[in-house]
Amino acid sequence: MSAGYVPVIWFRTKLIYDAVLIAWVGIYILTFVRLVPMLQPAGVDVDDAIRRMHAFGTCAFLMLSFVLCIGPLARLDKRWLPLLYNRRHFGVITCAVALAHAWHVLGWYFAYSNIDPYVALLASNTSYFQLAGFPFEIFGLLALAIMCLLAATSHDFWLAFLKPALWKGLHMLIYAAYGLIVAHIAFGALQTGKYPALAILTAFSVSAVTGLHLAAAWTTHKDVLETSTNAAPAEWIAAGPVNAITDNRGRVVRLPDGQNAAIFRHDDKLYALDNACAHQAGPLGEGCVIDGVLTCPWHGYQYRLADGCAPPPFTEKLSTYRLKLQDGVIFIDPRANAPGTPVEPVRIKGVDA
Amino acid sequence: MSSPPEFFTGYGEVPPALSRFLVKVIVGLLASSFVLALMLGLGVQDRGDGRYSGEIRATGVLFNLPYPVLRLLPTAADPQGHTMLVAGGGKIGAGDIADKAKGRVVELRGFGLKRGTLDMIVVDEESQVQPAAAPLPLFGAPVLIGRYLIAGEICDGKCYPGGMRPGTGLAHKACANLCIIGRQPAIFAAQSPIEGQSFLLLANKDGALPPPVLYDHTALPVEIEGEVMRAGDLLIFHADWSTLRKQ
């Protein structure tokens, strides 16, 4: 959490995660560049460099497609949350694979001439005003620049330096990078018309990423209780029946100002905190109370329910909200308290459990 | 720390039910890696019949038409003489060699590259050009065969015959341009053979190097009108670029 910075945080589950990722990449690349040539019929003869650039390029695309699916998968089924836990390492390894692809392209298609490979990359095809023959390399180059920027800032130091809102906004550029990579493939490798496996897989990957995001957005929208300013009494807003919240879990409520608050039930008491984790704006309402502290489902950041403060030595703080209970219905005061403000919980024993 | 069932915190214990699910996910992912690599790997193909033929020597007369060609000395079996394209190493053409030795009988040493009727010698250094003691034959200027409208693709003459595999297609367009910018021979791969030949050396309509407009049309299906010339068994297409149309 936030007590100090180390270059890379590793513990057992992260090591297993990284080992599986590296094994995945290793199996993919070795199968592509070593096994496949042995299985292809006589007469099929592809340069090793071209085979490697295809191997690393498709590997990076598949990894990025999957890494983008992890978020919505975890929203739809909590069992996928462990894959989200170490997504930064996944992103950094994906960037390294994409760099390997670029390195092979530069070292083959753009080398061996009397023009510098980086100049050749930008200058050898300048047909920017036609669809057929468009210099698709530029899409890949822009996507790689975004991926490198995101990999370089995938660290808690940058998160604290840029603040979560800006950091999160910056890292949403990964969707732009994904779009650029799809364009890179569509205007490049798919234009030969002789690569049906890549066409099918690209269509499937794009559909999966889009479909899962839409499904997760719909589910999240469904689970968030929309409130109305017309609810009485004046400044209090009805936030649903108390029995809609199970013990040690929460419910997300959308407030009139567009912010989401999360109401939690623990030991027959109700608490309300900001729904966005101070770390990466993870959905705290989908978290769980463990040993008396609210635990974020994304990276395990923890907060005390009574005042929204992370337990010492950590220093993150969340806004708190006042609650009250009338006839088994929870009411929330939509005016957020300053982060870390203690709020007396609402007791529900004997009301309507 | 005690986590409730199926809630994962990373630094805590993984709940047993979740462990079983994760093991299945890991096995599935590793298997998918193998299957996906096979699927996509087998899709990368080059069935072109061109390839390097090893180290060769060839003796003939060098010309620039407008790219360097070597017209081999006539033999009894081939009185017209065979004509080879001459390319340089990497993506740098052999124009300098041809400029210095054109019109002279030379022996070239390099690597042979052949695809169908396209025959090329790839020379790396000037030192491989040796003056030959053979008598200078009387090769005439290229002969006009006729005016044609030809459909096909503009390629670089080194990658197309097998210098790269695959050395065609839009993924290779920038590389093809880079070769042609470096004065490797530009060729036209015709959809239907002309005078029995599918590959024609490209030139401007006055026989000079093709204009830069060519770079927008490499690796794309096009049709161009122009005069076809013959030099030995090599056809040269003096294209009229104003007639170029996309197919």
Image (spheres, coloured by chain):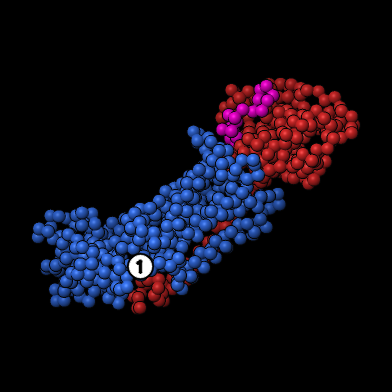
What residue is drawn where x is 14% and y is 68%?
A: A325
Q: Which residue is mark 1?
A: A2
Name the quarter where the C terminus of chain A is drawn. Answer: bottom left
Question: What's the residue type where badge 1 is placed?
Answer: Ser
Q: Which chain is red?
A: B
- Measuring from the top left, give residue A278's x and y in whole percent: 31, 63
Coordinates of residue B130 in the picture (x, y in percent)? 83, 37
Residue at 33% across / 58% down in the picture?
A: A164
Does residue A93 appear anywhere in the picture?
yes
Quarter holding residue A226: bottom left
Q: Quadrant of the N terminus of chain A?
A: bottom left
Residue at image location 25% in from the left, 62% down from the top: A274
Helix, strand or loop status at disc 1:
loop
Judge whether B237 appears above or below A290 on screen. Answer: above
In the depicted view, which residue is nearer to us: A212 or A318?
A318
Residue A80 visible, this angle: no
Residue A331 falls inside the magenta stretch = no
**Mark 1 belongs to which subunit?**
A
Q: Outermost residue, left direction?
A: A233
Q: In this rendering, is residue A265 above or below A41?
A: below
Question: Which residues make up the magenta segment?
Answer: B204-222
Mark 1 surroundings within 10 Å by alpha-carbon count, few (fewer than 14), some (14 through 19), many (20 or more): some
Q: Tell me the colour chain A is drawn in.
A: blue
Q: Is B219 in the magenta?
A: yes
Q: Nearer the viewer, residue A131 or B43?
A: A131
Could you say which quadrant of the image residue B138 lies in? top right
